Image: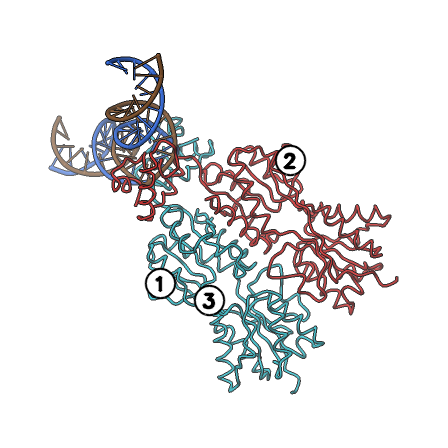
Chain colours: A red, B cyan, C brown, D blue
Amino acid sequence: MNLKELARHLGLSQSTVSRALNGYQDVSSDTRERVLAAARRFDYSPNASAHRLATGHSGAIGIVFPSDKDPLLDPLFTDFLSGLTNSAARRQMDILVSASLDTTDASYRRLAQRGSVDAVVLSSPLVEDSRVPLLDKLGIPCVVHGRTKSPRPHAFLDIDNEGAFRQAAELLIGLGHKRIGLVNGDARQAFAVDREAGWRSALLRAGLEAPEMLNGSDIMTDEAGYRLTAGMLDSASPPTAVICSSIFSAVGACRAIRDRGLTIGSDISVIAHDDGITSIRPEAHHPPLTTTFSSIHRAGERIAEIAADLIGGKDPASCQEIWPVDLIFRDSTRPPVSP
Amino acid sequence: MNLKELARHLGLSQSTVSRALNGYQDVSSDTRERVLAAARRFDYSPNASAHRLATGHSGAIGIVFPSDKDPLLDPLFTDFLSGLTNSAARRQMDILVSASLDTTDASYRRLAQRGSVDAVVLSSPLVEDSRVPLLDKLGIPCVVHGRTKSPRPHAFLDIDNEGAFRQAAELLIGLGHKRIGLVNGDARQAFAVDREAGWRSALLRAGLEAPEMLNGSDIMTDEAGYRLTAGMLDSASPPTAVICSSIFSAVGACRAIRDRGLTIGSDISVIAHDDGITSIRPEAHHPPLTTTFSSIHRAGERIAEIAADLIGGKDPASCQEIWPVDLIFRDSTRPPVSP
DNA sequence: CCGACTAATGAAAGCGCTTTTGTCAATTGA
DNA sequence: TCAATTGACAAAAGCGCTTTCATTAGTCGG
């Protein structure tokens, strides 16, 4: 069932039916009713390709997978994508996921030229990310999940990574900790840099040191979390507390602590950043983990809205949001045992 | 830069250029060279919407998120999607992710009518999944990741869940275990039913019981894994081994075991199913976990190929694959302590 | 040397929609 | 009363491709 048939059934012209369907003014409310009823009855919905060709909009938001199997691409992405997709669906938009087989540049360039998407979402930005200026040049709106250095202001939604990790470190300092380890994500990632800055500033502000020994950085997996934490605990002056960038790192960190016969909380305090994914919940741990919390699912939802605004012509410079992060105090943070 | 401009630049007609670009025969190799060179030089790629409208194919494979925030949607999905997308990209196809806001039926129906996708991938099928007959009726090819009951044969790629869990149980039985717990996924899911069947058949075949007490089933999260395992361990006749349906459940199960002062391996044996995601690796655990292994990333890759075949007109009945699952013996499985 | 065929290209129709422009009757104002 | 306005619809022109069909020029066999 297409527009032509529908129009013929109603004894109307295509244009009238089209306008009735799209809520234009110059059509009598009487015929509009009839058209809408018929559309429902015949279960008509306009052909996507034709609509796109006619309007010049693809009705889709793009997101590009970095490479064949990128370790930076973590399971959190599912939650993010779920939020993104749901929110996009509410605005009648789809999410187009494509992979960059050759270079990332080429993928975006192709995406832009073929007009497959109206806007693009950039995940896990690096500190200086070449994708932002590229998309700018290609004239395709983009919203970054996170932040990156860029000559021109770009739309983004980020969480207050620096503030969150400063707060976390301050909490530990307040409890009396003096050597606080950081189990961070990959140092190329923008968020990791911000978190390190938060950790560092809290320590320095309190007159403490932030030695490189305690500044761990790697991909955010269980195994890497174990390795980084183990390295710190086995060093000459081990930390009495660690802050982890992800719940996965935290699982590894906890394992390293327990493996050394130490107890989480009473011996070594642990704080983890929690993105709110359901598969691993910090409050279900023993002891329940103190966390900095921000829902990545909600971020996904909001980013689709921002993308829609951008497509609607909103100025990227006015599409910049930094969300505060909650610090949730649980039982994994206690005063250190006397040195 | 569009086809018309490109043709004008070359002093050729649109049709010739189009045919040259699409590799048709009736164009001289000389002009083909020129056209290809010009296309490269002007960085031309055909407009997606126009191409789709003209051919009637959308060039996209669809996948629908179940609901607003579905607990069944686990982090493994990222890996699956990554494989799917990469493989699709190699065939010049995109992945369209859309969410079902209203009913799932309506989403698929809309997807089909709007012609936004050429085929659909179904994830986490239920034992009897209404989506399969629906898509069949809508005439849109679909390939299921997993299997489901259906009057007509459908295309699918599944792993040998039953065989894997039978093998796992047999390994434990061979070591001398008599009470083996199952920490399974949601019982509505097809794969969970198959895994239970594997577990059960191994036990019965060995003349052992498969009591309901040891047949745990819930979503595959850390927390649920803990809860199910704890329940079994605290029961009147606790198991000496558990088999977990996911690495996440296994993390919870291990925690429950340790919390009770028991040691994994020597006191309670553990086997987990490993989908091969990088964030949590069973071999990095202490002790390294024995696993049934099958890469979900590879499954995603293969499913995109199957979808492409289906679009190309291949018979769904001849697109059915069941992959064997490796049983990887590590240190978490040992003979039980004498009862 | 000529009709029949082939190779290479161009012209034009069509995919299903949106949107501009055109048409016609009914209404309005002085 | 009559030109001017308005309301409701139809006709038709695109959007940028693919593909069918038509049109040349060149080749061949007899």
Secondary structure beneath dot 2 equals: loop
Q: Is residue A26 above or below residue B193?
A: above
Q: Is residue B240 above or below residue B41?
A: below
Distance, label 2 to label 3, CA atoms, is 47 Å
| Residue in the foreground of this view, choosing between A167 and B34 | A167
Identify the residue position indicated by label 3 in the image: B323
Where is residue A112 drawn, in percent x and y? 49, 37
| The N terminus of chain B sits in image quarter | top left
Tell which residue pokes out farthest to the right in this image: A339
Chain of residue at mark 3: B
Secondary structure beneath dot 3 equals: strand
Answer with left or right where residue A2 lies relative to residue B218. Answer: left
Which numbered marker is on residue B318?
A: 1
Earlier sequence position, callout 1 versus callout 3 = 1
| The C terminus of chain B sits in image quarter | bottom right
Q: Amino acid at mark 3?
A: Trp
| Residue in the foreground of this view, choosing between D16 and A207 | A207
